[in-house]
Image (cartoon, rainbow, N blue to C red):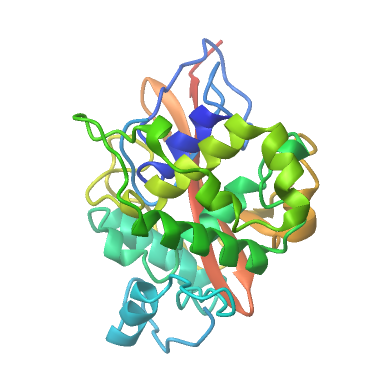
Amino acid sequence: MDRRMKKQILIGLLIAVMLLVLTGCGAKDTHGIPENGETNPTAAGGKEDTGKEDTGKADAGEADDSDADDVEDNNVEDNDVAYKLPAGASSEYELYKTVLAYLNNGFHSDDLKTVCDPVLTMVFFSKWEEKEDKIFTLGMQYDEACDLIARLSAKAAQMDAPYDEYGELEEDLIDFDAFEEEFPEGMRGQIEQNRRDFENFIVDIFYMESDFFHDGENPFYTDPTEWEVKQEGEYEVKEYHSNDWCDDLYDTFPKVYEVSLGTYIDYEATEMWFYYTQIDGRYYMLSFGYAVSGIGG
């Protein structure tokens, strides 16, 4: 995944888009830079440019105070303390209803905070690359990678980050060496050989937490504000896999599934879905995705 895609994904969880319209009906590619009508993965709302305990909630979108506390206390301050995911959903269908509640109730970020985690999503996309040398969580299981990302995020939060007058990071003033020491020694060579990609990866860490959720923004950038909530088993779900990406995504990250949310037809067709995974019996949304194509041929 290149720098431009990662910034789309992770600034604004990750995203207003460059929607390019095909002149004919477009085929769906579930990942990649949105060029020539390809897809654009997003997550929990966006802006222009990129769990483990039973909650006991029966209805989608509900969150009690203890769940909120779990979300607030996610950063790892000690290398020996494992990163803790938010509560998650107790079933695929509860997750589905929670996501639909977010979409149908005005895109309020609080509706997703117990089922959608920036660190887990960052790990997911860090492994979604064509070449191993661009994966800075290479060989790490998802939980090890979550620990690493959380430590990097905590370190970024402690820095007096340099921003320019437009609110953009002045990347040349960041102490990237301070982040390198968090990585295993076996990865130091890869970091030095791919220094610019590594620095881009660290810049994404700075943006990850602050821009994860944005209220009131349709993640598909379509006109409708209401989606049909189907009964369990009536919506399409499939396991995600593509030979285009490095095997590290499939070897070290839990299985990823894609839930269809239908196609909106206007002067163009917008196919909509979301990605999720299951960890320790809990269900987590990872990102929204969509593909835009022209109508007719």
Vertical arrangement, residue 278 with respect to residue 9, above or below? below
Q: Farthest left residue?
A: 165
Report whether 47 appears left or right of 288: left
Vertical arrangement, residue 197 with respect to residue 83, above or below? above
Foreground: 132 or 88?
132
Total tally of numbered discs in the picture: 0
Vertical arrangement, residue 83 with respect to residue 133, above or below? below
Q: Position of residue 177 (x, y in %)?
A: 54, 46
Rendered image quadrant of residue 11: top left
Q: In which quarter of the image is the N terminus?
A: top right
Foreground: 241 or 149?
149
Q: In which quarter of the image is the C terminus?
A: top right
Q: Where is residue 162 in the image (x, y as percent from the top left)?
A: 30, 40
Q: Position of residue 268 (x, y in %)?
A: 42, 22
Q: Could you tell me which residue is drawn at 38 percent across and 39 percent down?
A: 220
Q: Where is residue 223 in the image (x, y as percent from the top left)?
A: 27, 35
Residue 78 can be seen in this image: yes
Rendered image quadrant of residue 8: top left
Residue 272 can be seen in this image: no
Q: Could you tell me which residue is drawn at 51 percent across and 87 percent down?
A: 53
Rendered image quadrant of residue 267: top left
Q: Could you tell me which residue is drawn at 54 percent across and 82 percent down?
A: 52
Foreground: 297 or 149?
149
